[in-house]
Amino acid sequence: MKKIIITKKVIIANWKINPLTEKKAKKLFGDTVGGFKNSENIELVICPPDIYLPLFKNHSQKVKLGAQDCFWKKGGAYTGEISPDILKNYGISYVILGHSERRINLKETDIMIAQKIKIAQSAGLKTILCVGENAAQKRQRNTFSVIKKQLTESLSLLGKSKLSGLIIAYEPVWAIGPGDPCPRETALIAMANIKAMLVKLFGENGANIPILYGGSVDATNANNYLENDGFDGLLIGGASLNGKEMTKIFSSIVG
Ligand code: PGA
């Protein structure tokens, strides 16, 4: 008989640089966690701005905390950066790396991201690598070559034995922001391609790396990406700033 493996869907709330006050951050955390009842089938990860992490550290057993970035060194003379070891030692479980907003605004390259992934993985953080094409690359039908380059280069410093805790997020850049989500079928084709590329890079183990979808996820479409052998989870930006919307998302996810 085929073994049934029940794995939790991973929901990442990426708050970016929101909210602007501690009071509002506490309220948003409270509203989000208050509406989160189904921790048996969902792993909820909240990624606030780093400065708010201590507010939530001992707050809830049900929720994991993540950072939105980290540097590629353990420590030392790197003004303004945060190291994966500091995050891990502080009790943070996850880190998002290679988000398109950092690639665009801070000119992060795949090589920089590769160094970050290597050191974050060896610190023991669960590492979410974001990949995805922008609108022009999509128009030119370059989606898969873009993703292939991002995966190949960003994962080039990781050995086959270092894959535990690695997660990929497919985030088409054109879908990030309000209102233009990637159609499920298109997203699933990208997911299948990513899986095939991971198998090429890492052999059979590559097939076990979870793949999330991100880009204009809300309560009306969240479960659509997950159901019927869909994605392993979601990376949610805008909607994660609204506790009520998150509650609806949680209850829309059936299993
Ligand atoms: P969005 O952001 O949900 O607001 O589209 C997703 C992301 O940037 O990770």
Image (cartoon, helix red, strand yellow):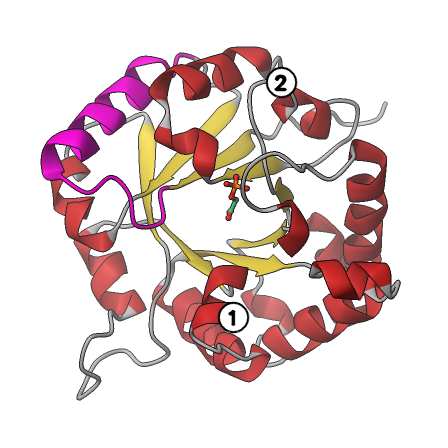
Looking at the rendering, the stretch of residues picked out in magenta corresponds to 15-37
Q: Residue shown at 81%/40% (left/top)? A: 188
Q: Residue shown at 76%/27% (left/top)? A: 3
Residue 39 visible in the current orientation: no
Is residue 26 covered in magenta?
yes
Q: Residue 147 sits in which quadrant?
A: bottom right
Which residue in the structure is indicated by mark 1?
Answer: 103
Compare marks 1 and 2 and give the one earlier in the sequence: 1
Q: Amino acid at mark 1?
A: Arg
Label 2 CA crowd tier, 10 Å (few <14, some 14–19, many 20+): few
Quadrant assignment for the C terminus: top right
Q: Residue shown at 73%/58% (left/top)? A: 135
Residue 159 visible in the current orientation: yes
Q: Residue shown at 18%/54% (left/top)? A: 90
The residue nearer to you, when weighing 10 against 21, is 21
Q: Amino acid at mark 2?
A: Thr
Q: Where residue 207 sits in the image (x, y, percent)?
A: 75, 52
The residue nearer to you, when weighing 121 against 245, is 245
Quadrant assignment for the N terminus: top right
Is residue 172 covered in magenta?
no
